[in-house]
Image (cartoon, rainbow, N blue to C red):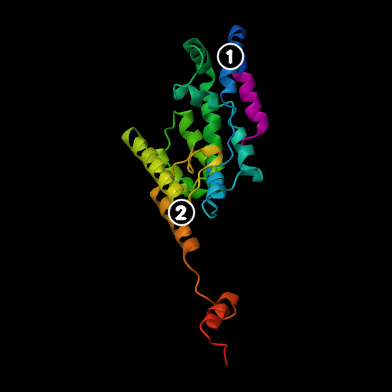
Amino acid sequence: MEKNVPFTLAQSQAIKKAIYASVPKEQHTELNQLYACLDYDNYSPVKRFEEAAGIKGIYHQYKFPNDMEPLEYEALMKPMRIYEVIERGLNPGEDSLANALQDQKPQSLFAVRKMYLDLVELNPELKKAQISPTQVRSYVAVISGACSGFPPEDIIEFSYAKGIDNDRINEEKRAFSKMLEQRLGKKGPNGMPLIENWCPSESTRNHILQILDKQEKPRAPQLNDGGFYAFLADRGWFND
């Protein structure tokens, strides 16, 4: 059996070239504006939270094909994410551009599905995530979540959220972030919420609270602890 070959940068660049070739040249300026929407700072929201809150143990380390770094793997999706933006109704251009792009969507859908399957093969904990097989954004959500180090439970819960459920988990995120900000007396970078661009599941929220409780639990004095001997001295134990 032929060994499975992971999706490559050359294939990603070929998809971008095919997308541009499918769009009339007079619409390339508009396409460039759409493509620019895909440039974003994706430093892991989980890492950002851990650093701001002063805790560790939430970020989940996934395996990526060819031992790629998370952001390197995510960058391979950039051409395909054009269709994520269109599917979400965030396209800044005209409908005519979206229509012109449809001929190349099957290729992008196939590619992002390939990336997803390669990822799940290495990380079976993601198999329970729900996928809408005709939507690029469905695959992107799982891949981006893994590249950001979201715990598997968070990715899985978010993949099932629709409508009211999506509103609920976002409200739970906001309420939990405010509670932590009050408890820790801290905010995120630039005064942003501690938890942003990430919706921790109930399992992850409980894990965060357990870590904080353990950090804040008073440590019992040890016999070799200078503080313990000072405690005894204050009570006259050494006044013979």
2 vs 1, front mark: 2
Residue stretch rendered in magenta on the structure: 5-19
Q: Quadrant of residue 72?
A: top right
Quarter placement of the C terminus = bottom right
Q: Residue furthest top?
A: 26
Marks 2,1: beta carbons within 8 A: no
Q: Which mark is residue 208?
A: 2
Label 1 sits on a secondary structure element that is helix
Which x, y percent locates residue 69? 64, 43
- Whether residue 99 sits left or right of residue 229 in the image: it is left
Quarter placement of the N terminus = top right
Q: Gap in Å between the C-alphas at discs 2 and 1?
A: 48 Å
- Taking 181 as reference, is 234 above or below it? below
The residue identified by callout 1 is 22
Q: Which residue is at 51% across, 14% downward? A: 93
- Mark before the other along the chain sequence, 2 or 1: 1
- Whether residue 164 sits left or right of residue 215 in the image: it is left
- Taking 81 as reference, is 194 above or below it? below
Q: Which residue is at 54% across, 49% downward? A: 50
Q: Main secondary structure of the magenta part?
A: helix
- The stretch drawn in magenta includes residue 6: yes
